[in-house]
Image (cartoon, grey):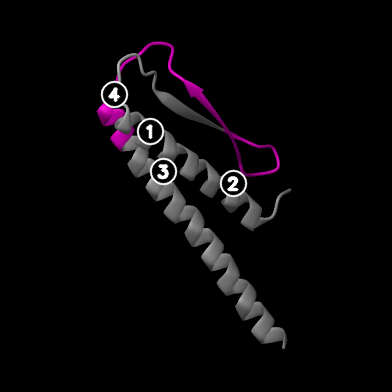
Amino acid sequence: MNSLTSISQSGLAAAVMRLDAAGNNIANAQTPGYRRQFVLQEEQAGGGVAVSAGRADAAGENLAEDLVQQMVASYSFKANLGVIRTHEAMLGTLLDATA
């Protein structure tokens, strides 16, 4: 099983990738023939997520979906960062107690 920090770090990486894809889709929404990017996340057996990127089959824009994906990525990033911060704080408290 992966450590708590490595699980959260995989979540952070997935959130960054999702945010990048949504931002790229918004920036290129009016580009003729542009195919939207998307990000797929799959859970890993030992914990964390595996991330893969792809492109839509057909050209077109979906601004509402991209804005939602940006918000989801932001909340996911904040949640995973909170886990890392809590882990570090608990580790620091444990070290203070044993010192």
| First along the sequence among labels 2 and 1 | 2
Q: Nearer the viewer, mark 4 or mark 1?
A: 1
Q: Is residue 31 left or right of residue 4?
A: left
Give, as a three-letter code, the residue at label 1.
Asn
Was residue 56 drawn as part of the magenta stretch in this picture?
Answer: yes
Q: Who is closer to the viewer here, 86 or 37?
A: 37
Q: Which mark is residue 24?
A: 1
| Cβ atoms under marks 3 and 1 closer than 8 Å | no
Q: Secondary structure at mark 1?
A: helix
Q: Which mark is residue 51?
A: none
| First along the sequence among labels 4 and 3 | 4
| First along the sequence among labels 4 and 2 | 2
Q: Which mark is residue 62?
A: 4
Label 2 environment density (alpha carbons within 10 Å; few <14, some 14–19, many ≥20): some
Q: Which residue is mark 3?
A: 73
Q: Nearer the viewer, mark 3 or mark 1?
A: 1
Q: Which residues are magenta?
A: 42-67
Residue, far top: 58
Give, as a three-letter code, the residue at label 4.
Asn
Q: Which residue is mark 2?
A: 10
Give, as a three-letter code, the residue at label 3.
Ala
Picture quadrant of residue 30: top left
Identify which residue is drawn at 53% across, 59% down: 83
